[in-house]
Image (cartoon, rainbow, N blue to C red):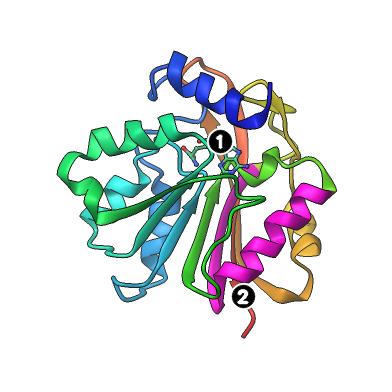
């Protein structure tokens, strides 16, 4: 099964609040974005936003230039359905982050929770990095959450690459400065413990 088919099947067969990565609110992501104190019309993209409620919370906080990208059309349709009229306040893109064309140096914030870690092939990681460098403004912010080494080796039944901050620093080379990081224990709706690593990087100008 290819990646898109996997994710379409997940979101078609399981309630959005029963998937392993579900949280009522992505509080760390939300707090870290708010703490940047950017103007509310700053473009923000959520990579692999899926059906998560981060978009709801960002709309409610007044952010006006939100883009939610996901490989699964079903995930995006679930989020839009939940948002109702408020769905018009975000831009929705269905596509694969390793191949999609995004506008150049457009986004002030690139948020990714539990998406990059699925890219276990160096080629795919490099394509992701290329898109990140293309679409994020110099001076922009990368807020990324991945499994850390204490977490299981699979997420949603797929193998993942688990990271310590140093590995992400090495991957991003000299283009970014690590501003902060922390580990956070997530317990899935089924009771499985997964340690996440969250990092905030600022892109050098
Ligand atoms: C583990 S879920 C995390 C969802 C959301 N970020 C959250 O934290 O609740 C991974 C999400 O990434 C999406 N995804 C997986 N591979 C992708 C890719 N190559 N490009 C874009 N989205 C992808 C999936 O459809 C899914 O919604």
Kindly identify which residue carries mark 1.
185
Please tell me whether mark 2 or mark 1 is closer to you in this view: 2
Please check the rendered image and state whether residue 175 is part of the magenta-colored stretch, yes or no. Answer: no
Q: In this rendering, would 109 be left or right of 31?
A: right
Residue at the spot 79% in from the left edge and 55% down from the top edge: 167
Q: Nearer the viewer, residue 38 or 151?
A: 38
**Magenta stretch in the rendered image:** 123-146
Find residue 28 and report its horizontal and vertical position in percent: 44, 50
Residue at the spot 59% in from the left edge and 31% down from the top edge: 4
Kindly identify which residue carries mark 2.
203
- Residue placed furthest toward the left: 85
Residue at the spot 69% in from the left edge and 38% down from the top edge: 118
Image quarter for residue 25? top left
Q: Earlier in the sequence, mark 2 or mark 1?
A: 1
Query: Looking at the picture, does residue 29 appear above or below residue 180?
Result: above
Image quarter for residue 18? top left
Please check the rendered image and state whether residue 132 is part of the magenta-colored stretch, yes or no. Answer: yes
């Amino acid at each position: 099964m290819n990646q898109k088919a996997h994710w379409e099947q997940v979101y078609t067969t399981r309630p959005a609040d029963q998937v392993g990565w579900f949280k009522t609110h992505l509080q760390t992501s939300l707090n870290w974005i708010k703490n940047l104190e950017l103007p509310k019309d700053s473009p923000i993209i959520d990579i692999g936003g899926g059906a998560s409620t981060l978009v709801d919370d960002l709309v409610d906080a007044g952010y006006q230039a939100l883009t939610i990208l996901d490989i699964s059309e079903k995930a995006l349709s679930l989020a839009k359905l939940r948002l109702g009229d408020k769905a018009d306040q975000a831009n929705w893109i269905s596509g694969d982050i390793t191949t999609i064309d995004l506008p150049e140096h457009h986004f002030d914030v690139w948020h990714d929770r539990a998406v990059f870690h699925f890219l276990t092939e160096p080629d795919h990681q490099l394509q992701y990095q290329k898109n990140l460098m293309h679409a994020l403004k110099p001076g922009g912010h990368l807020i990324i959450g991945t499994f850390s080494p204490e977490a299981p080796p699979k997420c949603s039944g797929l193998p993942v690459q688990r990271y310590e901050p140093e590995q992400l620093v090495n991957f991003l080379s000299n283009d970014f400065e690590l501003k902060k990081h922390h580990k956070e224990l997530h317990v899935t709706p089924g009771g499985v413990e997964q340690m996440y690593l969250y990092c905030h990087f600022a892109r050098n100008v």
